[in-house]
Image (cartoon, grey):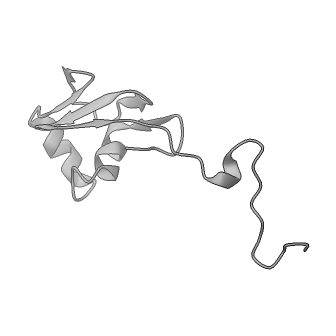
Amino acid sequence: MAIRGDEIRLGQFLKLADAVDQGGDVKALLATRAVSVNGEIETRRGRQLHVGDTVGVGYVAYTVTAPTPTPAEEPGSSVEEPGSSQD
């Protein structure tokens, strides 16, 4: 599951991954002790996750990944606006 920055809080990640429907559901899910981070049970919704961390929710595992850069973000690439070619 790709995140935007370098880190994300566990509660935000669970919402992003659609592991919970609403933010208020995070606390209840963590109380069941069904969430793990890097193989260890985690109950803190504020736990900082970093790229490469693995989050387990029941039988589902998610890996925190960096976003895939768009062509405009890749070094040395250029993206032309439609109609801007100089032929």
Residue pictured at 39% horizontal, 31% vertical: 49
In the displayed structure, 45 sits above or below 22; it is above
Residue located farthest toward the right when viewing the structure as drawn: 86
Residue at (21% x, 53% y) in the render: 20
x and y percent of residue 37 in the render?
Answer: 26, 26
> Is 2 above or below relative to 50?
below
**Placement of the N terminus among the 4 image quadrants:** top left
Q: Quadrant of residue 30?
A: top left
Residue 14 image position (x, y, % from top left) = 28, 45
* Vertical order, 18 against 43 (above or below): below
Q: Residue furthest front?
A: 87
* Residue beneath the point at 74% across and 41% down: 75
Above or below, comparing residue 87 to residue 38 in the picture = below
Q: Does 82 sit left or right of 62 as displayed?
A: right
Res 2 quadrant in image: top left
Q: Nearer the viewer, residue 48 or 87?
A: 87
Foreground residue, 81 or 54?
81
Relative placement, left or right, of 59 versus 52 is left
Give 57 or 30, whichever is nearer the viewer. 57
